[in-house]
Image (tube, grey):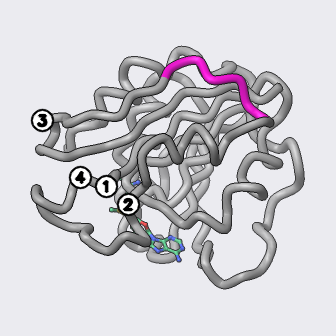
Amino acid sequence: MAQISEWVRRYYRQFPTNGFILDLAGGTGRHARFLSQKGFKLLLVDNQISKAQDLQDVEGIKLVEYDLEAGISLPFSASSFKGIVVTNYLYRPIFPQLLCLLDVGGILIYETFAVGHEKYGRPTNPDYLLNSGELINLVSPEMRVIAYEERLITRPAKAYVQRIVAEKK
Ligand SMILES: C[S@@+](CC[C@H](N)C(=O)[O-])C[C@H]1O[C@@H](n2cnc3c(N)ncnc32)[C@H](O)[C@@H]1O
């Protein structure tokens, strides 16, 4: 099984245990599987949901195929999630809607590539690289920041990332 993010492993206990966690652009579902094993209920969204087909029959995980960049509203009501996890995915226009999906007290765990990552591999396109401090700005002022880092990580692969844990006010 794919290694999960150390950031997710360190902070997943911040998620409230009642209600659904959204795994946004969840890919093969490495975090959905991990969180499900920890007792959370998950909804994984991706535009290539076949990648997560191994999770199709896993109790407590729902899979939804959806293009997050189609320019239309996300197919969920406001405040419908107690937590959101996003790793290795960035589409800036979605942030306001994403934060609306969190219930008050809900937790966002986000980790993705930042400027400085180019020398370690893809992505190199600035559209997919956070500028210094950008993740904090993207969640402000709706969220209270619990933890934030901007640094080189070496596991599961060498990458220059920004990562945040924040609570909906
Ligand atoms: C680098 S992978 C990260 C997957 C997962 N979050 C992880 O860290 O293992 C990026 C994911 O974003 C998904 N994705 C890319 N564009 C998307 C879009 N427009 N709508 C929904 N998902 C998209 C891809 O299918 C892929 O699974």
Tell me where residue 37 appears, x and y as whole percent. Answer: 43, 28
Eye-nearest disc, 4 or 3: 4
Residue placed at 29% from the left, 27% from the top? 6
Where residue 155 sits, quadrant-wise, is top left
Residue that carries the numbered disc 1 in the rendered image = 115
Q: Position of residue 147 (x, y in %)?
A: 50, 20
Please tell me the numbered disc located at residue 154.
Answer: 3
Q: What secondary structure is found at the residue carrying circle 4?
A: loop
- Of the image marks 3 and 2, the number of the one nearer the N terminus: 2
Q: At x 88% / y 50%, what residue is drawn?
A: 78
Give the extent of the magenta segment: 142-147
Report the residue marked by disc 2.
129
Q: Earlier in the sequence, mark 4 or mark 2?
A: 4
Q: Which residue is mark 4?
A: 116
Q: Position of residue 123 (x, y in %)?
A: 26, 67
Horizontally, is 138 left or right of 110 in the view? right
Spatial CA distance of label 4 from label 1 is 4 Å
The residue type indicated by label 2 comes to Leu
Using residue 62 as the reference point, say whether residue 75 is left or right of it: right
* Mark 2 and mark 1 residues within 8 Å of each other at the beta carbon: yes
Front tag of 1 and 3: 1
Q: CA distance from mark 1 to mark 3?
A: 16 Å
Foreground disc of the pair 3, 2: 2
> What amino acid type is highlighted by mark number 3?
Thr
At mark 2, the secondary structure is loop
Q: Residues within 10 Å of mark 1 (few under 14, many from 20)?
A: some
State the separation of the CA atoms marked 4 and 3.
14 Å
Type of secondary structure dominating the magenta stretch: strand
**CA separation in Å, label 3 and label 2:** 17 Å
As shown in the figure, which amino acid type bears the numbered disc 4?
Gly
